[in-house]
Image (cartoon, rainbow, N blue to C red):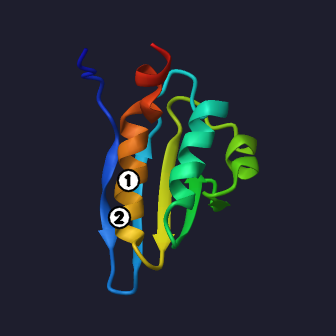
Amino acid sequence: MMDNRPRRAAPEAVDTHGYCQAEIEVTHGFGLHARPSVTFTRLAKSFPCTIEIEVNDSHVWLNGKSIVKIMGARIRRGSILKIRARGLRAAEAIHALKALVERDFDEDKKHG
């Protein structure tokens, strides 16, 4: 089933120093509860760069590889995430994490 809901997404910004950032709206029905948080942090940990997120322009950047930080942020549907990465494979990490959020953390594939 195709999901045609509008998604807020900004183009990715990449510089020559291994820094990349993107912005995306969380559209998953329950936000980042336990399973999506684990999926997000597991993917983030697979990249050798630093990954941080900011929720709803809070000006507080959280470690995107920390399940405690991600779960503690209580990220709900409609939240705007800024994801930034610095270092090796930063652009690849941002692309993969943004795609994961756009796919609603693959929840429909895992849990019907």
Binning the other alpha carbons within 10 Å of mark 1 as few (below 14), some (14 to 19) or many (20 upward) gives some
Dot 1 corresponds to which residue?
A: 96
- On the image, the x and y values in percent for residue 53 come to 57, 57
Looking at the rendered image, the quarter that the C terminus falls into is top left
Q: Residue at horizontal 62%, vertical 41%?
A: 38
Asked if the residue at tag 1 contacts the one at tag 2, i.e. Cβ–Cβ closer than 8 Å, the answer is yes
Mark 2: which secondary structure? helix
Q: Residue 62: in sight, yes or no?
A: yes
Q: Is residue 81 left or right of residue 100?
A: right
From this view, report whether residue 39 is shown above or below residue 84.
Answer: above
Between residue 54 and residue 111, name the one nearer to us: 111
Residue 11 position within the rendered picture, expressed as x and y whole percent measured from the top left: 28, 57
> Dot 2: within a 10 Å radius of its alpha carbon, few (fewer than 14), some, or many (20 or more) residues?
some
Name the residue rendered at 39%, 72% in the picture.
89
Q: Is residue 3 left or right of residue 32?
A: left
Determine which residue is flagged by label 2.
Answer: 92
Task: Identify residue type, mark 1.
Answer: Ala
- Indicate whether 17 appears above or below 80: below
Residue 62 occupies which quadrant of the picture? bottom right
Residue 73 location (% of width, % of height): 70, 44
Q: Amino acid at mark 2?
A: Glu
Q: Is residue 49 left or right of residue 108?
A: right
Residue 66, percent from left and from top:
69, 55
Quarter holding residue 1: top left
Is 7 in front, or is 32? Answer: 32
Residue shown at 41% from the left, 42% from the top:
100
